[in-house]
Each structure stands twice: as structure tokens, then as C-alpha cells.
Image (cartoon, coloured by chain):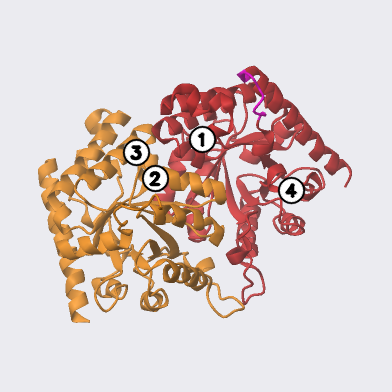
Chain colours: A red, B orange
Amino acid sequence: MSAAVGRAPLTSFGSRLHARMGAVGSAVCLGIDPRPTDHPLTHPDRVAGDPAGVARGVVELYRSVLEASHTRLACVKPQSAFFEALGIPGVIALAQVIADARSLELPVILDAKRGDIGSTAEAYAAAYLGDGVWSADALTVSPYLGPDTITPFVATARSSGRGVYTLVATSNPGAATWQDERTEAGRLVHEHVADHLQALASEHGRYGSIGAVVGATRGTRLAALRERMADVLLLVPGYGAQGGSATDVSQAFDRDGLGAVVSASRSLMPGADAADFAAAGADARSRIEAMADAIEGALTAR
Amino acid sequence: MSAAVGRAPLTSFGSRLHARMGAVGSAVCLGIDPRPTDHPLTHPDRVAGDPAGVARGVVELYRSVLEASHTRLACVKPQSAFFEALGIPGVIALAQVIADARSLELPVILDAKRGDIGSTAEAYAAAYLGDGVWSADALTVSPYLGPDTITPFVATARSSGRGVYTLVATSNPGAATWQDERTEAGRLVHEHVADHLQALASEHGRYGSIGAVVGATRGTRLAALRERMADVLLLVPGYGAQGGSATDVSQAFDRDGLGAVVSASRSLMPGADAADFAAAGADARSRIEAMADAIEGALTAR
């Protein structure tokens, strides 16, 4: 008899994400990009520049935001770079923010854009899709090294009900330089990456563990990539401050309004006039509700 | 009068690396890839599985190796993934290994393959090319997002005498899938990345801050890429355990035997029979000397 007999069937990342989106009526993914100097409540001056104090301020601010707004959030996306820039206290704060989100049953997509060869990719997967202090529900990864370097992340994710979002077409000004090179086979480089992800998703199950990052400002590309990756979960950054509108991002969803989450960070942050953490949480909540409603409206208007 | 008057001229990363290569007669870059279960001296069983104890064992092992062998090392290349996989104690250990290497005047190339859009790339640059606990001499970065995402790393590196090694052509089995796609312009994707780096290096100065990662097992590609990136510092992983020979890697150097370092990790690690840290250091030293001599021999035989 197999050792697995009696175990509850493992729920895939995509199933969990979709269940939550339905329950909260939102496709909003809150990007957590702590820039301490951007807000008086986390400003280093507040703690005389003490790095541990700065990191604690970041944890406290996002705890207030999550507690006030989690019932309208599909998920959260901490950006690892901003925590790493705060040193050891920063990566401890990252663990705390992840734990806070998970205690509110918010799926965590860790935006770390890792990628490396075989056994090294396994080490990254163990760090972020295992049971350690940075245990996230999904991880963003970079495809440049090749499909064999995505495999270890997918294997770990599948075995633990987690997800992997691979970069496909990003929103930054220079994204087209290599991603949109037309190859002899006639397709663009990012379309080749997209086709690989679609093949994986088709093999492993629709909306399960395989995801792709597609920027909101890629215009008509977004609709084409939604079609091209019919079984792949999309993560769409670039809404709001970066220029993508609700109508733009609505193209990332399938006919049932599923298959995508839209992230924003700067535009959802509480204004600098929020006098305390409670006020900051309330301000973020109203911004998040407005974004969730705008996307809902754009999906209904299609 | 400019505020810069009176400041000592900043020595570029490449100048410092070349000065050291000349002084120690070696182009060997020691890859620091801690896999604690691989060696009895770092095995978790030794410390009853205590994560902080495991991380301390890693620091102690590499301290012994560096103290015994630094006079034949051009530089070291810690692989961030293996430290991150050890959690908070692991990233503290990374800071300690970096500090140990720098106290021996060994340039540190942090292999973290980071990459992200504008302000996020700046955060990574601040984390690893700034003055924080993980202050390295150079950082590996991934190019998929586009040239504008390499720029912030280069700007930080240039202003602080540090280096940036961008992935160009890697050694893993699936490397060719996207890196070697032939574009309509006739060149391969990785050649386009290479041309961008060469343009940067030509603009900013030969063998200064701009580097490229080119795998040792890429055959005749290595010689072609050396020519194509005449002003770019190469970092060549894949020697030894991964299959590249001394003759293979000799193609990464220019006619003066400059412009490249060759990294190896597994094949330079002390054997499992090293009974204590001192014996482990001595064993690694003899492996490193053999590799340095093999490369020197291949360069002389050209």
C-alpha cells in the first residue's frame, strides 16, 4: 500500500487562489514594496536610523494594511528586493510579513525573480517554496537560463500545492529588447517562453501550479497572451502608478473572470497624511476597494 | 571647485581583479556553494540539526579553506541560493563569509542572478553593491527584463569601483533553448545580449565594471564570445565537475592571459575524509593549486 493512502488530496495553488478570489470578490494582489523613506510612519528618522527599528516599522505598517484590507484582497506580492536592501533586519521582516499574510489566509506570491541551474534552483525552491521562514505560496522566477532551470521550481511547487510565476512579458521601457525579438521560427522570444509554460500547464493541469508574469502596459499583447496560455495563471503588474488601466488588465482574465490577478503597490499605499497605523490601514483599504471595484466593473463591461 | 577634488581616483573592479590575478598567479575563482549534508564537518547531524549550528559550520569550513588557499585564488563566488536555503542563519553566514574573504583581500563575486525593473533593481544594487552586510565586489545579474534593468546595477557598480556580471551563455543542458534562438537580424539572442555588454564596456572602459557569464561547456562559443566582447570581463563557470577542461576555458582569456576568471565549486571542495577543518583547508588548497596550474599550463600551451 502506498504511504500516501489516507492523505487529503493536495489542493493546487490555483484552486486556492480562485476560491479566495470568489470569496472576497477581488482580483487585487497587493504589492508589498517597502521604501521606508516614502512614508512618515516608516521613515528612518522616526527611529534615529536604527535598521531594526526601520524594519519593525515596515512590519507594523503592512500589518495594519493587511488587517484592514484582507477581506478585499486576492493575494499579496512582497517584493524581495526591498526587504533585502534593509539587510538582516529586512529579511527577518520579510518572514514576519509573510507570516502575517498567511495568518489572514492571504496567499503570498513572493516576487524574487530567482533562477539558476539545476541543484541551485532546487536550493531557491527549498528557500521559498519549502517550509522555512520565507515559505510563500508562489514564487516569481526568471527564464533566461532555459526550461530545465524552471523544472525544479515546478517540481517543488507541484508537490506542495504551490505555484511558480515565470517572467514572460514585462512592463518596463526596455522589455521589448530581448523579449520581443522575432526568431527564425516566426514567434517572438517571449511567445516561445509562453508556449513552454502553456505546455507545462496543459500537462500538469489547468490553473494549477503554472503561472506567468505579463505586464499590464503591454497593450494588445495581454489579450493575445491570455489566449496563448489558456491554462496558465497570469500575474499582471503595472496597474495604476505604472500606467495600466482597468480595461487594459481586464484582458488578462478568461471569459469567466478567472485566471489572473492584478498587482499594484505604490498606488495602494496609504497617503503620507495618515497620522497613525490605523489611519494608514483604513486609507489603504479604500484604495484597494476602489481598485477591486474598477477591475470588477471592467470585467462586467466586456 | 568640484567636491571630488582631492579624492583618490577610484580603482575599477577589473583593475583590482587583474592586479590580484597577477600577484597570486591564478585565475581560479572558488565557488562557495554550501551543501551542508555533503561534508561530515558541516553535516546537520553534527549539531543535532540546529540551523544556527549548521550555518556556523559552513562559515568555519570556508574560513579554513580561504585561510589555507587565498594566496592561489583570484576571487571567490558565493552562491546566494545555498545560503538562502539555510534561512536567516544562512544569510547571516553569507555576510560572514563575505567579510572573511574581504579581510583576506579576496574580491567577492556574489552569484545571486538578480534582475528587476528600475527602482527594484536599484534596491538589489543597494543590497549587494552598497555598504551593507552583503557588500560584494561584483554581482551576477539576469538580463531577461531588458537593458534598462541592467543599467541601475552598472550605475551603482561604476560609482563604487564594483562589477556586474550579466548572464550571457550558460552551461546547463537547456541553456540553448532561448539563449541560442536565431533572430531575424541573424544573430542569436545571447549574442544580442553580448553586443549590448560590449557596447557598455566600450563606453565605460575596457575591463572595468562590465562582465559577462559564459559557461565553460559552450565549446567554440567561448572563443567567439571572447572576441565579440573584447572589453568585457568574463566569468566562466562549469570547470571540473560540470565538464569543462583547462583547454576549453583557456579560450576565455585574451592573448595576454587576462580578461577572465574560471570558477569551480564541487571539484575544489575538501574530500569527505578530511578529519578536521585544518585538514579540509589543506585539501582544498592542493585542489585549487592543481586547477590554477592546469589553467596556467593551458594558457602557456596556446
Q: Give the residue number, with chain letter if any, for mark 2.
A: B130
Quadrant (top left, top right, bottom left, bottom right) of the C terminus of chain B:
bottom left
Disc 4 sits on a residue from what chain? A
Within 10 Å of the Cα at label 2, are there few (<14), some (14-19), or many (20+) other Cα atoms? Answer: some
Q: Is residue B215 left or right of residue A75?
A: left
At horizontal 50% and vertical 61% (from top left) the residue drawn is A146
As measured in the structure, the alpha-carbon distance from the residue carrying label 3 to the one carrying label 2 is 9 Å
Disc 2 is attached to a residue of which chain?
B
Mark nearer the N terminus (1 vs 4) = 1
- Which chain does the numbered disc 3 sit on? B
Q: Nearer the viewer, residue B254 or A197?
A: B254
Q: Which residue is mark 3?
A: B133
- Same subunit, labels 2 and 1: the answer reads no
According to the picture, the residue beneath numbered tag 1 turns out to be A4
Three-letter amino acid code of the residue under disc 2: Gly
The kind of secondary structure the magenta stretch mainly shows is loop
Mark 4, residue position:
A244
Residues in magenta, as a range: A270-277
Label 4: state its secondary structure: loop
Numbered disc in front, either 4 or 2:
2
> Is there one chain holding both mark 4 and mark 3?
no
**Which residue does the image show at 24% across and 76% down from the upper left?**
B256
